[in-house]
Image (spheres, rainbow, N blue to C red):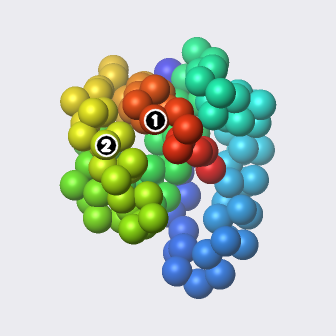
Amino acid sequence: MDTFLCISINLQHGFEQTLVSYVNHLILYMSVDIEHVDRTVEGYFHPSEVLGCYFSCIFTTFDLVDNAGHIDFDKLSTRIPDSFKDHGTEMIEKCRHITGTNPCDSAFNIVQCFQKVNPSKYFVI
């Protein structure tokens, strides 16, 4: 398994510009295929550790991963915008039992579960 460094950034100031810049950096740094990221919206999850590590880094960026590399679903629940609360809560409740062999595998499996639970509301950064 390759090791990837996830950079923690301050997302409070210039949120959108900072996030776009970070995601672009992450895609280049990790050599993740952007088509594989985008196609998850359609339900296609290319079996790739890099894709899982990309998702893990996104969760880490939003401070949603504990020291053991597990998604903090309770914290995630508090961050759901009101406009997405019902759908997001459903996704979390149906996927909170999902794990993997490592943080990247767990993130891959969880994001795949989110997409399966509510494909019409699923989106990816």
* 40 up-or-down from 13: above or below: above
Q: Residue at horizontal 54%, vertical 68%?
A: 9
Residue at image point 76% right, 36% down = 34
Residue 56 percent location from the top left of the image: 47, 41
Q: Residue 20 carries which label?
A: none
Q: Position of residue 6 (x, y in %)?
A: 53, 51
Three-letter amino acid code of the residue under disc 1: Asn
* Residue 27 in which image quadrant: top right
Helix, strand or loop for disc 1: loop
Instruction: Report the residue at 71% width, 62% height from top.
Output: 20
Circle 2 is placed at which residue position?
Answer: 90
Q: With respect to residue 31, does 1 lie above or below?
A: above
Q: Position of residue 99 (x, y in %)?
A: 29, 26
Residue depicted at 53% across the width and 33% down the height: 119
Q: Earlier in the sequence, mark 2 or mark 1?
A: 2
The dot on residue 118 is 1
- On the image, the x and y values in percent for residue 104 come to 45, 31
Secondary element type, mark 2: helix
Circles 2, 1 touching at the beta carbon (< 8 Å):
yes
The one nearer the camera, 80 or 58, is 80
Say if 94 sits above or below 28 in the image: above
On screen, residue 82 versus residue 46, left or right, reads: left
Amino acid type, label 2: Glu
Q: In this view, does 63 lie to the left or right of 96?
A: right
How much space separates mark 2 and mark 1, taking CA atoms? 8 Å
